[in-house]
Amino acid sequence: MTPNGDEELALEEGGPAWRVWLRTGLAPSDRTHLGRRALLLAALCWLPLLGSSLVDGTATGDSVRVPFLRDLAAYARFVIGIALLVFADAAVAQRLRPVLQEFLSAKLIRRDAIGAFRAAVTRARRQIDSVVVEAVLLALAYAGSWNVVHAELADGQSTWHALATDGVESLSRAGWWYALVSVPLFYFLFLRWVFRGFVWSGLLAKISRLDLDLVPTHPDRAGGLGFLSIGQAGFAILVLAASASLAARCGDEVLYQGVALESFYPTLIAFGVLALLLVLAPLLVFAPRLAALKRHALYEYGRLSSRHDGAFRDKWIADASRPQPESLLGNEDPSSLADLATGYERAKALRPLPIDVAAIAPVIVAAALPMIPLIALRVPLKEILKGLLKVVM
């Protein structure tokens, strides 16, 4: 609960992992604790790989196709990615908590629906705190790790974590830590936030079906729901983590396998589009409500305008015996005519989706930013930055 009694949905809290961090003093989402947790988990993933590859002689040199210290994906996942997924505990929560508070403080939830609103939030909190869910996520993380390792063992080429001897590949010392700790931990942290994103989407869907007091002439052109896109922009940090991992993986294949960079363009574009759609998809649940609100408002303002404009015409235009135009000075009728026209235009401008392009710009930047160094292998950096600015601005 917040100090004023409003419900919060703390997406970073709950579940066995959170309780472990609580016991170790790494749970709070302030910068100091998050920095320590990010440093600890990144060190847990990366330092044993460095030590083992040094012992195996695969950290540098040409003994394997991809030495550890030149593996872009290792840095992107186990240093940058882990840190970003940890700092998401603050970045996402700081965006989404005010969203729930805004529904109440802006009185968008009608009085008789507040109980259902609080019940929906409570149920979402229970889902986040589920032990079973995190056990399933951990199992999925290990399944994903096994698939990655199995694919890398099958390509027949030596890397710092998979050594090929007489045509048979086996995991190196670093490879075992990679398969059992580093990759599963990265996947688990990512899947943990994916699940929380689904919980958040489900909560928004329930809220969209409540009795909401939306205003068709609200300046945000979203009935008063424009703040939702600001909240969704918090997920940009997760997009950044995924994009960094993808770009680094593509970079490794370009540098060490001779794959043409151009062959990855469809994948990179598809990722950017998919990331944007996934972040914005939860807001689609409000589209029917806003579309109905717009239709109803246009009918109401149309009828009111017809009556008002007809009365204005009858009073000031139709009767030639009316006083001279000087009598209009200081009269409120022309002013009300302009105000009514403004209200109608605002209702007409109501968007069917509560999406503000400026608010979601961080998502676009997060998807594109890690790809800049990759594409810079073929396209001048200046041209890349110009193109990115055209999309964002």
Image (tube, grey):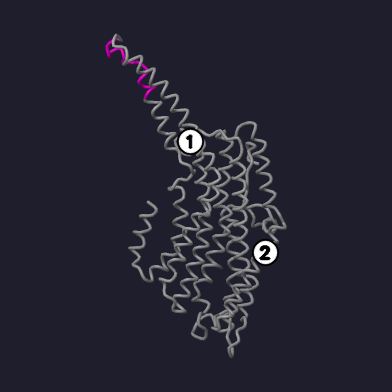
Q: Please tell me how crowded label 2 is: few (under 14), some (14-19), or many (20+) other residues with Cα within 10 Å.
A: some
Q: Nearer the viewer, residue 76 or 335?
A: 335
Point out the stretch of residues depicted in magenta. Answer: 323-337
Picture disc at residue 294: 1
Residue 164's spot in the image, x, y percent?
Answer: 57, 86
Q: Please tell me how crowded label 1 is: few (under 14), some (14-19), or many (20+) other residues with Cα within 10 Å.
A: many
Residue at 42% across, 68% down: 374
Quadrant of the frame with the N terminus? top right
Q: Is residue 77 above or below residue 236?
A: below
Q: Magenta region, mostly helix, strand or loop? A: helix
Residue at 69% across, 57% down: 133
Residue 236's spot in the image, x, y percent?
Answer: 50, 55
SS type, badge 2: helix
**272 sits left or right of 152 in the view:** left
Residue at 65% across, 68% down: 142
At label 2, the amino acid type is: Leu
Residue 160's spot in the image, x, y percent?
Answer: 55, 80
At label 1, the amino acid type is: Lys
Q: Of the residues under marks 2 and 1, which one precedes in the sequence? A: 2
Viewer-nearest of discs 2 and 1: 1
Asked where in the image residue 39 lies, by quadrant, the reply is: bottom right
SS type, badge 1: helix
Residue 327's spot in the image, x, y percent?
Answer: 30, 12
Residue at 51% across, 76% down: 69
- Residue that label 2 marks: 138
